[in-house]
Amino acid sequence: MDPNFDSRQACRRSFLATSASGLGSLALASLLGADGLLGSNASAAQSADDRNPLAPKPPHFAPRAKSAIFIFLEGGPSQVELFDPKPLLNEKNGQKMPDSILKDVEFAFIDKKEAVLKGTGVKFQRAGRAGIEYSNLVPHIASCADDICLVRTMVSDQFNHHPGQLLLHTGKAEFGRPTIGSWLLYGLGSASQNLPGYVVLNSGRGASGSTSNWSSGFLPSTYQGVPFRAVGDPVLNLANPAGIDDRHQRRALDAIARLNGQRYSWVHDPEIASRISQYELAFRMQSSAPELVDLAGESQQTLDQYGVDRPTPHPAPDMQPGDTYRRFATNCLLARRMVERGVRFVSLIHASWDQHASLKHDLEWNARAVDQPVAALIKDLKQRGLLDETLVIWGSEFGRTPLGQGNDGRDHHPHAFSMWMAGGGVKGGYVHGQTDDIGWAPVRDAVPVNDFQATLLHLFGLDHKRLNVNFKGLPTRLTNLGGNVVRELLA
Amino acid sequence: MTSKPFGRCNRWWLSCLALTAWACCCLPAIAAAPMDFGRDVAPIFAAHCTSCHGGEKQESGLRLDHRTAAMQGGDSGPAIVAGASGKSELWHRITSDDADEQMPPAKEGTRLSGEQLAKIKTWIDQGAIWPESADTSSPSKSSHWAYQPISRPAVPKVRSAAWTRTPIDAFIAQRLERENIAPSPDAPREVLLRRVFLDLVGLLPTADERQAFLADTRPDTYERLVDRLLASPHFGERWGRHWLDLARYGDSNGYELDIVRPNAWRYRDWVVDAFNRDLPYDRFITEQIAGDLLPDAGLRELAATGFHRMTIKNTESGINEEDYRNREMIDRVNTTSAAVLGLTMGCAQCHSHKYDPISQQEYYRFYAFFNNVEEVEIDLPGTPAEQATFREGLAAHIDLRYTVQGHLRLVEELIKQGPAKSRAVLEATYEAAKLQLESQRKLQELGLDRWYKEVPPKLKNALRAPDWVTSSLKPGAKTKSYTKKSVELYFSSLDLHNQRLADRLGSLERFAHRLDEPAELIDALLLEPAARKGAQQLIDDYCQGLAAKQDELKQRLRMLAVEERYLPSPHLLTLKENTTGRRATHVLLRGDFKQLGPAVEPATPAVLPALTKRGKQPDRLDLARWLTDGKNPLTARVAANHIWAHLFGRGIVSTVDDFGVKGERPSHPELLDWLAGELVRGSWSRKALIRQIVLSSAYRQASRFRSELEARDPLNTLVARQGRFRVEAEIARDVFLSASGLLDRTVGGPTIYPAISDAVRDIAYKYQLVWPTSPAPVCYRRGMYIHFRRSNPYPSLMMFDAPEGTVCTAQRNRSNTPLQALATLNDPVFVENAQALGRRVLAEASADAHQRVRMMFVDCLGREPSSAEAAVLAELAEAELKAYLAEPQKAAQLAGPQAGTNAQAAEQAAWIAVARAVMNLDEFLTRE
């Protein structure tokens, strides 16, 4: 990768929206004007705008979505207990599967000799105008059925968590590649002048993919996801040091900008102009990020809708300090507030759904944690007229086996699992694909992970093949070597 | 989409039958005449096939311009079966109607004519006779510049003789003269000083060093400075870190569990040391690739093989070990080729390289060199200090774990039995703890085997020992991740553990008071209900929060289990050649570890000079010698280009990890060859080459942008000025530390842990980020020593584009983001440096504001401020002083508790604010 990657990209671009990006010429001009630096040779302000790698860029064709909220249920939620009803599993509970199916498959933990089908303890009910079946573990999500485009035939080829997460987020089970949010920022820029364009909200016990789930890979850190928190400092290093308030900070930044401006007028390195504008953006973030996470302006009704104040049942599965109902619900509400403020991509992570054991208790616990807030998010976006342009995604790196593991668990299952999307130009009230009678594999319309990614980019007006970067000698893209837009999912 | 690789079709036989039938009735009847390859067939191949299947490109590994190669076939087998067109994949493809299969590809829109098809069919059926004389090329010949031998260009004669201090300058000047561009003048001496310090050692010159340099008027001042810097131990740190990017260095395994590699730093130290003693580059590579096979291999050579132990490793339970072993081998191949050869060989993993002449077979032949390596941990005796640290650490750790365990038991029993039974609960907890001691004493007394056989389960289960010890207790158990030495040291430290435990278990009261609760509460819990009186309230309050306490303690225990992995004793991560039960290597079809293709033997790509083997079959040592024998056209060019890129901010080949067909061409090909030649001729001394470059006029140029060149040469490929760029992530930290004076200059040793925010732990998997924050002065060591946890790396490294340490990285990005601004403005680790600088300047400079400003400027930027610059800072100081005089509390917060009176605190705070501003200037983090 070229070290001056950002600059080179910027050079190639047409600058449609210069004044909407970065610092804004006027503010910088006034700073430099104070030192009499605005002259024939000092167009730092314009330069900073031109070089802003996050300046909004036109998509390849008319987009349906402008923002995405990717709700990532880390660990592999059991699709047969949530979205893909398999009554046959209950009938055949405890029976062996035909060897013909088991012959070529692998499991992480299940012993093939002992493997038996496992029934589900849940009931499925029809929801929405199309009467699509949802489990009674997710009644609130079911109430959004008319907006949901449910894919029951997602297919992955990765068997273990971290590689599966890399495939889902970067298009290939390999380290060092950019995640979906990074690609969107790279392709479209950011619509927000005060906030990062790619934000990460963590909850639960922490996802196994950790920072690789929001890495910019070989792209510059400009395109990295930025973790936000609802408590404490919303963004790392956002708070001024003790003894420095905003007035001190402003004075410091003014002095820094003036000195940088003086250096610029001598050296003419446009990177200095970028630096000045990044400091200003940092300063704006210092007020806009706390404002963003401050829920004081939200009505009690809204808070209740999201279930922010619901107590966390005890004991939680594998209890961790961040694993509260409040935290996930608050993150859903924050996601809406981010989208309202122009954030391009929100990664809303909840971990863990890796129920090798205690499936009944832990899955119920998790479902209750997320069901109400997720549905509230969809309805809230809709009510505010944001759902049309906001793609909400529910997904994981894989699903779980129709076979049981131990008394009360299921193993990893990449051969068929469910994901869904809502808003952002997808067809609501629609089910795509069908799995066989036990939910082992698709019988039609399999959707490989790369196809899902191609479709996602398509909704943003991006051709997944054209959105590529030359890396290690190859044009490299989110969809790796695959990817077909699944037209049936589009509204 | 690309078309299907040659040779893989599912409906193979069916379609063959159909096609044969079709061909029989539709082909012109010329079949009977004998075909002459050169006359009848070669022209068809040349016109329609060899642009993709020829000398320059071998799509799917097939080439049709040379007999041997053509008969060998493509990625998945033969294309031509002599005498049987129906069995020949080639025939199938040129007649197929499937758009994914047909050749020439459907998108090109040309099909072979019926006559052409008939000729090929007949030629195959007649035995596919291909005389050598009809070859249209020799095998594996490529005209691509990088595969040609390194030339010995004459140093050009140029007009600007006055400017050319070294031959390097002649090459640069020649090109500039052609373009009619004058080079930039020398940078001001103080800028050059700061530049060469940053480039060679990654630190700032001190004020004294600067003074001495500027005052020295001897003609060779700069030369002597360069020699001094090259001899500095910090040179190895600076340049070693460059290599560690290529070596994908990290202090943990990567992937989900991301288990710590407590001894990875020993390889890092080997690298630093290798640079410092200027280990010749050929030897440097040889030891890392095959140190274990060298006849004189000692610990140092074995440490070098740690290079290929830096590979990420998945230890998630339930993985397919063969799958991940294969991924590790692939990483070793790709890293070797990217780092040493500048080749993107990884592209040939699933199919033959689309652009470079590397077939998939050749990829797996290269893979075969590594396919029989075995990972070995070598026990080191360690220094007595290391051993003592390990024993102490282990004892303290077990002690703590045991306490938390007891504490948790107390909480859980209180939940179960209620507060009325608190004394009984404590007694039971105490008794359980005693079992632990007993178990441990037995272990010491009986030894491992007897302990295992004789001790009752109850006592066995009571043993609190790290996982890696318990897993090795079973007789015959293989200790996988830890060495024998670690376990031995555990046993030899049992005495220490027993003492600590015995001390704790002196009495029930003593035991209870060691639990992490207030003394009054413990006293109350020790009372029977009747005797509690007022203390009952204390207990009731405590019992309110038991559930939360339970969670907290469980989490603590989990953390302790993770921390144990940081403890193992000194060992080296090495590779050795497996001599028994050797694996055969196969082409992996489509890169899939389950789809074994043809077996292959170790060999190097045919496009490069042949390898000389010592024995019957070539091994890694032969490979290493092949890489470094001076005839390899890539190794020296790539190494010289790396060095150039670090000294100018851009390589002569700007795609430093791709010298292949798709990479950028060299901007100065003769210069690159000259430098590569110098490297080889100079006994592969990198210090000598670096010295030559930094002494050149090209290097000494000013980096100021030139408006007249912005349109003509925006990327400065002509080197008409020096590069100007932000320093790397680790150096950003080092610059802060060296300007403030806090820097601890210790070289090498275990990793360090500068303070981090809780927010960082918050995003870790299961919140399990062990971060034993380092005390001063260790926490002030250089950025390259920061513990690099791959799944959750130290945030300010990543903000400044440090590589993730998972794959070979030849060139870092240089982003410019608001998060960087927030880090240097607000992260306590950076702010601490502003505080130190502010205080130091107050202590060392005179009371005059301009003197203080001047000192800060010189210490941070290495130059005097202009009067306009000084004015801005003096103004800031004044405004801040005024503000802090009015806000004594804020002043005290920023200046710290030792600041003295309000006025003194205000003055300190004001100058800290000024220091913070200077340290946030673009120029501060920029190498000009």
Image: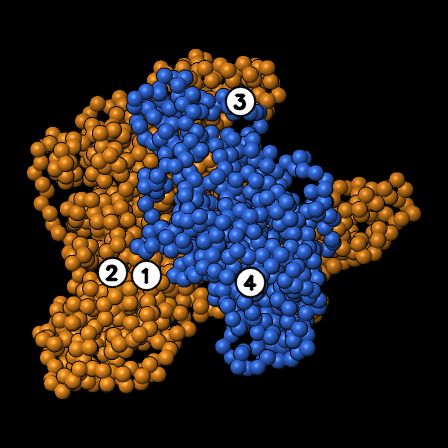
Chain colours: A blue, B orange
Amino acid type assigned to the residue bearing label 4 in the image:
Val
Number of numbered markers: 4
- Report crowding for label 2: few under 14, some 14 to 19, many 20 or more residues within 10 A (C-alpha): many
Vertical position of residue B417 compared to residue B904: above or below: below
Amino acid type assigned to the residue bearing label 1 in the image:
Cys
Q: Quadrant of residue A352?
A: bottom right
Do badges 4 and 1 share one subunit? no
Query: Contact (CB < 8 A) between labels 2 and 1?
Result: yes
Do badges 1 and 3 share one subunit? no
Q: State the mark number for residue A248.
A: 3
Amino acid type assigned to the residue bearing label 3 in the image:
His
Residue B507 on image: x %, y %: 77, 51
Earlier sequence position, callout 2 versus callout 1: 1
Q: Is disc 3 placed on a helix, strand or loop?
A: helix
The residues bearing labels 4 and 2 have C-alpha atoms spaced at a distance of 40 Å
Camera-nearest residue between B134 and B910: B134
Whether residue A355 is visible here, answered yes or no, is: no
Q: State the mark number for residue B356.
A: 2
Depth-wise, is mark 4 or mark 1 nearer the camera? 4
